Image (cartoon, rainbow, N blue to C red):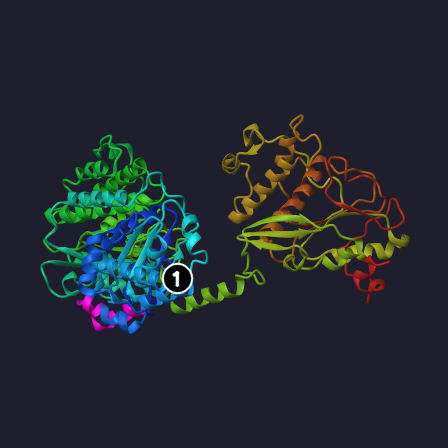
Amino acid sequence: MFALGTIQELDDFFKTTQERKAQLAFCCRLNGYNGRVAAFLARYEAEAQARGRVVTGSIPNPNPGHLASYTEMMGTAFQAQESFIANSLAKWLPRLEEGQRRNLAAALHQALEEQARAGKSEPILKNLYTKLMCWLYYDFARMLHLLGKDRLPKVLYEGTPGIHELLLLHHLARVGCDVLLVQPEGDAAYLKQDPQSQKSQAYTAPDLEPFPAGFSLQMIREERQKTETLHSLSGPAPDVRVSVNPQPSSRWLEAVKSAPSGRGPETDQTLYTCFVRIRGVEDRASYVGELYQLPLALEAADRKTLILEGPPPPPDNAEINAIHRGQNRETEGIIRDMLANLDGLGDAQVQALLRHALVNLLLEQAEEPGMTPQRLASRAVSALCRLKRYGKALFEGRKPGAIACCILLGACASKADALFLRLLARLPVDLLILQPTPAENDPLQDPLLKDLCFPETLALDRYPRESAELAMGTAAYQAERDLDSLMYADGSLFRNRQCERAVALTLKTTYEEIALLWEQEAKYRPNFAAVGDTAHIPVLYAKVSGVRNADVSAYWEALRHLLTPETLLITKTPFCPQVQPCPADFLQGRKLRRERIRAHSSYGYGVLREEVQEHILEKIQALLDQELIRDLWQQDRERVVLNSLLQLDRQVTRLLQSFDFTKKTPKAVYVNTGETALSLEDTALFAFLNLAGFDVLFFVPTGYRCVEQHFAKPGFEEHQIGDYLYDLPIPNFRRPQSATGKGRSWRDFFKF
């Protein structure tokens, strides 16, 4: 006896008993509809017609003639015994094999026992038994000899079966027959007689919808016949067939280079081709060299080769207008239109293969969910444009039995690209798709496609056609790159100047934390992050007012210890020279015209690293965008600011040139013991340095507002640390440290 299996996919119905990996049959009901269900029903209905039974409405009750014939042959005796039923089947259905008869007798006996447990009397059981026997003979006899075979027979029932019909269908499945109930009106009537779904399984899928109004199996049958008619459009069968990927291989580059005649049994009726997509790289040290050698080997073998770098460009208007198409709104008409465009694409052999491939693939495309005639026609036209564009390179002057080769470096960009490649794969063409860096979303899917995946990747934008383009790494070089990726991929370690861009994040700290963070590398500071090639750098930006405990000596000693090699010290005001407005054409609206600026004779940053120049211009633009300077867009102040920042002090540009965004930040310390306020140019400088990733500290022992005058919105924190002192002479910080500070930590000066 067969167990009832659970359907996962509708195509499970078409698996042989060996493929089901257990003695399983399916008894399933369909209560919803979608494109996949439609395609499945067309196939299932055809198989039920050929090797089973299609029931529309109900199984007719035995008529008087059927009952008279049964009584004449079998008599009126009845016993609800399995042995009695088996002996009766041997006489009533003599074509059954012994195992089939034994299983069918057991199934009928179980059906009768089930009814007896439900309280049915013996006369009712006898009538049910007679009905079941008549149904088996008059309605199912032609399929019973197939019960339990490797390819199970199929029963297709349209509607909701009655209780006796359900008994029969359920137990036929137990004997080795697939049963499908199609219920356009839904499941409510069925569940009244089998509320626990014990006799059949309801197929479910997230996108099932109610059956279309007026749905019937007759519609499916007519659609299948229409499809068969469409297949006839492709004309006589080609005199050759294409065998794709006849032999499994892990060395597909070598397989493509191999002579087509040696890929399988020699025959004039078969062309052996490859259809392979290779994601990733097996050996980075040799990959580029292998690609370079491949077209050379194909040329030496006199094989036509087409190399595409990236997806084929979309067809232009001239190509589209060259494709004949009518106003057809039905699949058949669209296919007829497309077939009319194949003249001139290859010889008679290619033409025959192409006609069959085009018809089959367009029929398949027409079944996609949401496909409309307009979309189908558009996709077909785009694919044919590509065929006409590249067909000459692949098929012109083709010799009988020749196999061309098409190599695509990259992935498809659209379903039309995928259709074009799928058509090529069914022609005398080796199709090799190379993705040394695997594409995330490749629309190409095909049962003929062989997918190979390798864990390593390689950035390759162009196919290596010339020896000058070859840049092949040694094994040691690739190992170093692997180690490099392993060490620096997780953001805990960084290569020198790994990040090319930077965004400064101003830290709000206590005064005491300045000493703790001052010499700390950016990557160890709170809120540091590296995303892609951009470092998000936490920076210090503060004004320190007053002198702690009025201890001038300690105050200056603390400042001395801030002066690292990365520190710009400014003790005079103004620091930046006064400048005139820059040329008006340096700005367009409120945006920098970077190319104009860099091309100007006054541009002095051309000697800096390219990324440093971009960093400077980017932060100048950010300063303008954020309007950090008061009244920036009045009286040409923006042009003064821009001109000043395009003439930065050499010490500033050298600090920027040396700045590794993940390591120690450059620093600027400004000391003002008098009453002179920052100039517009100096204000622009410090605002820029903050945006560029500098730590900036203003030391103002007087507590005066000598820093804020030109800032529209000061972004720095002010720390009041002690008494205000005036007119303090600023010592020469470049002298060696005095003995009075010996033995004290400079961090001590930041503590209470």
Q: Nearer the viewer, residue 675 or 402?
A: 402
The correct choice, above or below, for 554 with respect to 382 in the image is below
Q: Nearer the viewer, residue 136 or 317?
A: 136
The residue shown at (64%, 31%) is: 638
Q: Is residue 278 left or right of residue 242?
A: right
Residue assigned mark 1: 120
Q: Where are the magenta residues, as a range?
A: 89-106
- In the image, residue 718 lies at what x, y percent? 79, 46
Is residue 103 on the magenta stretch? yes
Is residue 29 on the magenta stretch? no
The correct choice, above or below, for 361 with respect to 249 in the image is above
The quadrant in which the N terminus is found is bottom left
SS of the residue under disc 1: loop
- In the image, residue 518 lies at what x, y percent? 72, 57
| Magenta stretch, main secondary structure class | helix
The quadrant in which the C terminus is found is bottom right
The residue shown at (30%, 47%) is: 57
Whether residue 244 is visible here, answered yes or no, is: no
Residue neighbourhood size for the residue with mark 1, other residues' Cα within 10 Å, grouped as few (<14), some (14–19), many (≥20): few
